[in-house]
Image (spheres, grey):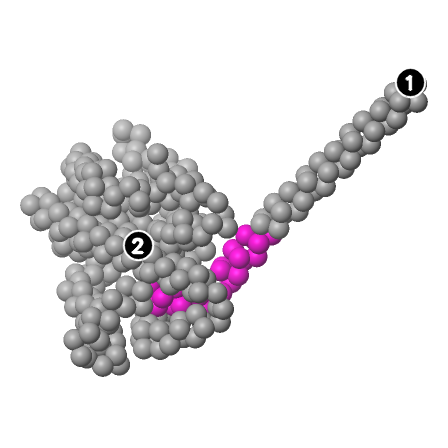
């Protein structure tokens, strides 16, 4: 009887010991798994940051190819050769870009010429508001402060002009490279995709790949097309409002509002600051500037809370916190262009997570409740 109890106790101890070993092995495996994904994220982030000048044209050209592929296929159906259809689509894109640039060039040049004076005026007004003691007299410390502010103004203007002068040619070059790459993707991407499908032996894998690409293309086209129409409407509304109020070059600022609205939350915030500054400089009144900013915020609130959710539907109703963090990340990685293409990238990621089962129901994390 004692031997039986002893054997039972030993068996129980062995089972407990084996369970503990299995738990330790499972915990270690989970820790390795988490460490692998952290390391993977760090490597991918570093690669994207270092190779941004190479990757940005590729990403942009991929977006263009996915968006324009249905139009090229339509030309094929009506008998237009693929090369001619692709060239027509690229020329149409270039024509739209040049038309928009030609309309905005003259007022943009006028504001570019005013930029140093504008920065100086704003800095002086801020300094005056800070140093004003109600008597109009300046102490010796204020005189020193004035000299420091003057130097700061000069450095700020020079830095701003240099930054814009350096960034603009780079962006234009990358956009032209992206258009050339989009031409080759639209012309030869189909044969490359067919060759990729031939690498799969299982028909189900081919079907999954085709459906995944079609889903990304459909979701991306719907998102960018809808958001573009919404932002054009927003730009027209803001430009019309500024025209009624009497702000100089109202539709230039309307175009700025529409472009910046491609970056939710951060873009409208930047537009709001710009509109407040130009309103104050033109009217020399804080109350009028605040009124104009409030009017813009009202238009933007109607667009973001009612128009966009209604037109895009629940599928594209992404979590605002995720969008905000995502835009900050891409703004840090690729600057202003990263912020503009951040949300379309998030839409593609959402589609990938939804269509692929390897990450479970992770895509639900991105959705707003």
Give the answer, above or below, for where 3 lies relative to 30. Answer: above
The x and y percentages for residue 127 are 32, 40
Nearer to the camera, 291 or 113 = 291
Q: Main secondary structure of the magenta part?
A: helix
The x and y percentages for residue 212 are 38, 58
Give the answer, above or below, for where 139 lies relative to 182. Answer: above
Give the answer, above or below, for where 134 lies relative to 254. Answer: above
Residue stretch rendered in magenta on the structure: 39-63
> Which residue lies at the image location 91% right of the left edge and 18% below the top edge?
1
Mark in front: 1 vs 2: 1
Residue 333 inside the magenta-drawn segment: no
Question: Left or right: 136 with respect to 9?
Answer: left
Nearer to the camera, 7 or 362 = 7
Dot 2: what SS? helix
Question: Left or right: 54 with respect to 108?
Answer: right
> Which residue lies at the image location 30% right of the left edge and 33% below the top edge?
132
Camera sees residue 180 = no
Task: Kindly indicate the quadrant of the structure image that contains residue 130.
Answer: top left
The x and y percentages for residue 191 are 37, 76
Q: Which residue is mark 1?
A: 1
Q: Which residue is mark 2?
A: 219
Residue 46 inside the magenta-drawn segment: yes
> Which residue lies at the image location 35% right of the left edge and 34% below the top edge?
369
The x and y percentages for residue 357 are 47, 49
Crowd class of label 2 (few under 14; some 14 to 19; many from 20; radius 10 Å): many
Q: Work out which residue is located at the far left of the displayed protein and give it.
A: 244
Give the answer, above or below, for where 149 lies relative to 134. Answer: below
Dot 1: what SS? loop
> Which residue lies at the image location 24% right of the left edge and 72% below the top edge?
72
Instruction: Tell me how far mark 1 sits from mark 2, CA to CA.
Output: 72 Å
């Amino acid at each position: 009887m004692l031997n039986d109890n002893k054997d039972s106790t030993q068996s129980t101890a062995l089972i407990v010991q084996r369970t503990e070993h299995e738990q330790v092995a499972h915990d270690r495996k989970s820790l390795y798994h988490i460490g692998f994904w952290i390391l993977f994220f760090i490597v991918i982030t570093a690669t994207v940051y270092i190779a941004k000048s190479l990757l940005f044209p590729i990403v942009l050209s991929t977006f263009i190819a996915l968006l324009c592929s249905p139009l090229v296929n339509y030309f094929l159906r009506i008998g237009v050769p693929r090369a001619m259809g692709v060239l027509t689509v690229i020329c149409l894109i270039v024509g739209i870009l040049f038309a928009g640039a030609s309309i905005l060039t003259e007022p943009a040049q006028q504001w570019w010429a005013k930029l140093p004076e504008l920065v100086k005026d704003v800095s002086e007004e801020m300094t005056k508001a800070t140093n004003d003691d109600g008597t109009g007299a300046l102490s010796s410390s204020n005189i020193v402060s004035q000299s420091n502010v003057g130097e700061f103004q000069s450095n700020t203007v020079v830095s701003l002009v240099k930054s814009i002068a350096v960034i603009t040619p780079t962006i234009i070059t990358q956009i032209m490279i992206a258009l050339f790459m989009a031409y080759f993707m639209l012309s030869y991407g189909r044969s490359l995709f067919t060759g990729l499908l031939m690498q799969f032996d299982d028909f189900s894998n081919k079907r999954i790949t085709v459906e995944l690409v079609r889903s990304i293309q459909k979701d991306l086209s719907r998102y960018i097309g809808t958001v573009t129409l919404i932002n054009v409407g927003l730009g027209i509304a803001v430009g019309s409002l500024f025209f009624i109020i009497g702000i100089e070059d109202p539709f230039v600022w309307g175009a700025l509002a529409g472009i910046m609205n491609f970056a939710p939350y951060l873009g409208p915030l930047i537009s709001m600051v710009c509109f407040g500054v130009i309103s104050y400089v033109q009217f020399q009144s804080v109350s009028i500037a605040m009124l104009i900013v409030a009017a813009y915020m009202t238009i933007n609130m109607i667009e973001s809370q009612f128009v966009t959710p209604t037109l895009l539907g629940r599928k594209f109703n992404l979590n605002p916190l995720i969008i905000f963090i995502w835009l900050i990340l891409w703004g840090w990685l690729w600057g202003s262009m990263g912020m503009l293409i951040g949300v379309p990238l998030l839409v593609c990621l959402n589609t990938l997570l939804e269509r692929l089962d390897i990450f479970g129901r992770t895509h639900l994390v991105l959705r707003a409740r």
